[in-house]
Each structure stands twice: as C-alpha cells, then as structure tokens.
Image: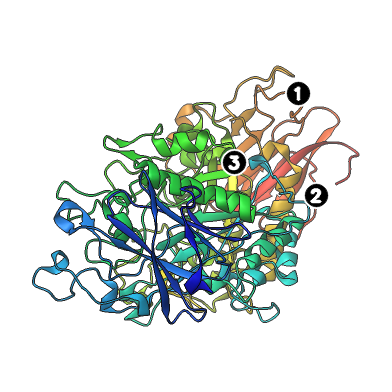
Amino acid sequence: MITSAAVSSGRATPLGATFDGEGVNFAVFSQHATRMVLCLFSDDGKKEVRQIDLPERDGDVWHGYLSGIRPGQLYGYRAHGSYRPDEGHRFNAHKLLIDPYAKRLTGHPIWHDALMGYAVGSPKADLSIDKRDSARWMPRSVVVDPSFAWDDGTSPGTPFEETVIYEAHVKGLTAMRGDVPDPGKFMALASDPMLEHLTRLGVTAVELLPVQAFLNDRFLVQKDLTNYWGYQTLGFFAPDPRYLGPGGIAEVQQTVARLHAAGIEVLLDVVYNHTGEGNEMGPTLAFRGLDNASYYRLADDRRYYINDTGTGNTLNIEHPMVLRMVMDSLRYWVETFHIDGFRFDLCSTLGRTAHGFDPGAAFFDAIRQDPVLTAVKLIAEPWDIGPGGYQLGAYPPPFAEWNDKFRDGVRRFWRGDPGRAPDLADRLTGSAPQFDHSGRPATSSVNLITAHDGFTLTDTVRYAQKHNTANGEDNRDGHGENFSDNFGTEGPSGDPEITAARARRRRAMMATLLLSQGTPMILAGDEIGNSQQGNNNAYCQDNPIGWVNWEEADTAFCDFTAKLIAFRKTQPVLRQKRFLHARSRAVDGIEDLFWWHIDGTPMEGADWQDPALATVCVEMRSASGTPSYTASDTVIFAVFNAGGPCCVTLPALAEGTHWICEIDSNRPDAGPTPVEGSDIDVAEQAVLAFVLAARGSPG
C-alpha cells in the first residue's frame, strides 16, 4: 500500500506529519537544503521501502501529501545539500534523520560510527564525510493520530499562590514500588497508590523531569550507564519511548487526565536550549543534518558551535523557524496533552541575543503574546554557563523562577553559618530584593531546598562531601559546595543522637520551605527520607541510587510534611502575591510585617548585623495594599531557631485573644495547642508557627 500511495503537493503548514483521515501531509523546514527525501519503512521498521522527493517548496518548507498513509507509518528524512562544515553546512544524505516534529519515535539511536556525518578517525576529523547509511542504527519517526476523548478537559487551574510543586522523575518515582502496574512508565505515575500518596501529601502539581524523547550519550553507554535525567532532547514533540507502554502516546493523555481528576496539575521540565547532537564531533541525527546553520548558533568560524549550555551546542532561537518549532512544541503539549505548565531548563540561553541576555528577546515576546501559553504556568531556570548567564530575578512576567538563593540561604542558616539571619528574613518574605519589581508577585520565587540536581534533603544532613564515584568521573562532577552537614559522621549513622539531630534539621528545613512566601517545590522522595547515597549528580544513575526508595520510607516525616502543606493551605497569609515590607495597612493602621528579638523587643537595623544571631522571629499579616476581597485578618507569628534551646516572648495580645501553636517541628505529632502566658520554650533547631485567635475559638 505504501509503495503505491499517490503523491500530491500538500501544504506547508502544519509542519510535521499530519493525518487528515485520508492520508498524511508531510512538511519539514530546511533553509539550505537542495533536495528533501521522505523515506518510508516497512511495518517492522527494518526495510526502507520507498523514497519520495518532497515535491513542493514554499519558502524554506518542503512538503508533500501521500494519500492512503495511515497512523503507524514509519518514516524519516534524508536531506541533500552542501557538506561544508567550514561554512556551517553538514548535509549528508547517507544519514537517516528524525523529523523534528515527529509525534512518536520507535526507540533510541544505537551507537555506531555510522551515525556520524564525518569519518571517525579521519585526519581531517569532522571536515571529512562518512558515506555509510545510518538507517540501521536510527529510530523511526511514527505517524500518529493524537486525538483523545477527554472527559471534560478541565485542568485544576490552581493559582500560583495556592501551588505546591512536587518535582519527580517518571521512572524514578515508581521504579521501586511493587504495588503499581508497569513501574517506571507514565501509567504507573497515575496509578491508584501514587494518586493516594500525592493527594494525602497535599501537593497540587507534579513537575516531571524531561519526558520529551532524548538521547543516551555515547560516553555513558560505553560505561554501562545511561542518560537518566533526560537533558539531551532529540524530539520536542515525542514522548520518550522508554516511558510508554503498548498504548503509545494515549498513555500520557490518560495519565494527565487521571492526575487532573485528582486535582493535580502536570508541569514539564523542557530543554529548548540545546539538543542531544553535541558539538562538531557529535552524531547527525536530526537538526544537524536538516539544516545545521539554521538550527544552531555557530561561532565566527562556522565549523564550531557556541556552547552556552555546556553540552556542545546551543539552539538558535533567534532564527524564526527554530523559534516557531519551540512555540509549536509548547502549544502541542498544552493542546494535545493538557499540560499545565513548563519549567525551562537553562532559560537564560533562550533569552540570549547577539548582545547578551535580554528579557525582551524574541522568545519571551513570543510567549507573552501567545493566548495558549500565557494561560499556563511558566517557570525559568534563570541561569546558564555563558557570559552573564546568571539572571535570577531578571525575567519578565508571567515567568516564575527557580530561586537558588532560597536553597543556599536556608541550608546555610540551618547549618549554623554565621551572619545568615538577614538572608533568611529575605527568603521568608519572598526574596523581594530579587523579585519585587515590574509588578511581579511574590509567587515568582519558586522556593526549593532540594531538586533533582544536588543532594536530597536527607543527604544534606548525612554528607559533608559529594560521593559521585558511581558516575565514572572520579568524583569530579557535581557541585563542590552543597552547604550540607553530616553531624560528625559521613553517611548513615546508628548513633541515636546523630539520628535525632538530623531529623530535627530535616523537619526545620521543610517547615521553613512551607512557611515562606513564594511557591514551594518539594523534591520527590524528600517527604519519605529518600537518599541517593551522597550522589549529588545522579543524572546517569537509572538504578536504586536515582530511584525513590519506598521500602525504607520515613512515614513520620511524610506525615509531618503533609501537616505543613495542610497548614499552608489554610493560611492565606502564607500564600500572598504582594510582598511584605512592614508598611501600614489601611484597614487597621497596623504594619504587615514585624521582626522581633526573642525577648519580645523589636529588631533594629544594627541588630541584624550580629553574626551570632541564630533565631529569627517574624509576625505576618495580609500585605499592605491587599484588596478587601482577598484580605485576611489572620496573624501568624513564626520562630526559626537554628541555635540551642531558648525562651521566646510572644508578641503582645489584644484583649480577648490568644496564640495557638499550630506547628512545632520538635513535636511533629502535636495538634493545635493554645498558649497560656507570653513566654514559650523553643527547642534547638526548631520551627514554630502560631496563629492569633479569639479566646474560646477551637484549639
């Protein structure tokens, strides 16, 4: 059938392979190719049964229509053109290429020298050309029909101020659970046991590490390792085959639908700053072979790549067709899979122009005017390794940003580093020095203590040094400074005093995260005490090091974390969009923020300069300027004590009121406790939160 399918002109849009019920329209971009050949494969993918020159070119889009072609058809491209690496062109028609718009792939490239466009070992290196056919070692692109019968199609639509993010790896979250079907697959993520855990915990959004099809790096495969995290994208539209079962891409849709039904949003970590093809010595798999000079940012010597990402190449987002691909990809995931938002890896790269980072770059402008994408959550990782790449706080609304200053500041305060109290005060109140400008809300700060990159929460209190030898790089990889503390013993300890001290620190840090202004993010597994054995760069550990260990779950800590999340949800004062700046409120003339000494006297400017200050006491109300329709009359007083045991004097009370202790990290199981008197004993390494209530109200 496919050998006799009639060919006609088709359309230049949409790009990709589009099934219309009668046949398939194929359209692919290449500005510099001289000929574009569509290759069709047998059902088992082993035989290339037909080559078809796409008959039309509209501008830089090559296209054609094949009647009778159905979903499931396997295909690829061969692009003809100049092989002149010194001019930026690396066309090699001997190499089968993935369609950048492919909605599904059959698998992953199998490493072989034939995948290289150049002759490996040649004295001319990448200036040479390799004429072996790469098809045997390449996956096939697959024609799909992405239609899906959504029940009501309704996303939870959780506002940022009510959001609690749970960062998870599709496989790692469920690989060690024996009570879920297909562990490690999409469907396991939305199984009943996982939905029960997530809803009991109280998180509102799951942020998934990359799920777009990605490459297993050759140097990892040669060491019997794999690209576990997935930050080497090959297909921006296709879910990675390793996470799919026999249901194909519909399993992603079913997973999202089930999570939505449970009130949980789905966010994706996406990598549009580079691809898995690497530098000039990398393979020719898709973009390089279709139009290297358009897809990538090249150096003045066009043979080489600009590498602001540390991966060998950087996508050329300034090219309109590359920007279009990124925008089309984002819209596809929203419209086809009902994804609720995105976290952009190395987002500074996406805002780079010839003059450096620009918050008005084409990428940001395109997103900010897009009616589909402005309706979902947008989160930036606000740095890359290029010059001027660290841009925390510089992103335009509606972007939120990962806040590494929160991570480092909180870790250092609880570790007992001198002089960290002023920084903690900034972090508790939404990191205003970074984010309070341009009308940005306090929720712009995505607060995290841990993430996939770095120590887990348990490992921050078990290890003083990274232990990455399993990565095969002689422990050179990963962050050198983790602001962690092993309490005198490196690794697990059987000493009950050390174990208790570590537990106190973990509870205090989790409480700090969930009592701070901003948008909290929890690393999957932290709530049950998961450890990565001191590995702070488990990107290649698709094994128990990188997976969440459910068999040794700390259920008590999970209960405490759920308690903190539940408390946060009941307290609008902890979830404000406006920043707290100790300004008087129109409703009562009382300031919205007070800082107190432990003896009940107000903190003065000079007091913050005491390097020994280890206890921060804060009183919070609805921010000045809060509209009446969102204002709350709640008052919260919180104590963050990184030092030894102390006595704290509570703020003075109005007649007929009293303080109720809702959170005490030293007594994680305690219920709400009314306070009699004005002085309270605070344990070492503890967080307490009090709510002002009328006497006689429920305790």
Which amino acid, by three-letter code, is at mark 3?
Val
Q: Quadrant of residue 633?
A: top right
* Number of numbered discs overlaid on the protein picture: 3
Q: Does the residue at mark 1 contact the one at mark 3 (Cβ under 8 Å)?
A: no
> Of residues 674 and 234, which is closer to you in this image?
234
User: Residue, x 88% and y 44% (percent of image)?
Assistant: 698
Which amino acid, by three-letter code, is at mark 2?
Thr
First in residue order: circle 1 vs circle 2: 1
Local crowd size for mark 2, using a 10 Å CA cut-off: few (<14), some (14–19), many (≥20): some
Left or right for 280, reference 385: left
Which amino acid, by three-letter code, is at mark 1?
Ser
Residue 516 visible in the snapshot:
yes
Q: Check disc 1 and report the residue beneath it.
A: 628
User: Residue, x 69% and y 36% (percent of image)?
Assistant: 573
Q: Check disc 2 and report the residue beneath it.
A: 673
Q: CA distance from mark 1 to mark 2?
A: 30 Å
First in residue order: circle 1 vs circle 3: 3
Residue 308 locus on image (x, y percent): 29, 50
> Of residues 392 and 598, which is closer to you in this image?
392
Q: CA distance from mark 3 to mark 2?
A: 47 Å
Residue 180 locus on image (x, y percent): 69, 77
Q: Check disc 3 and report the residue beneath it.
A: 372
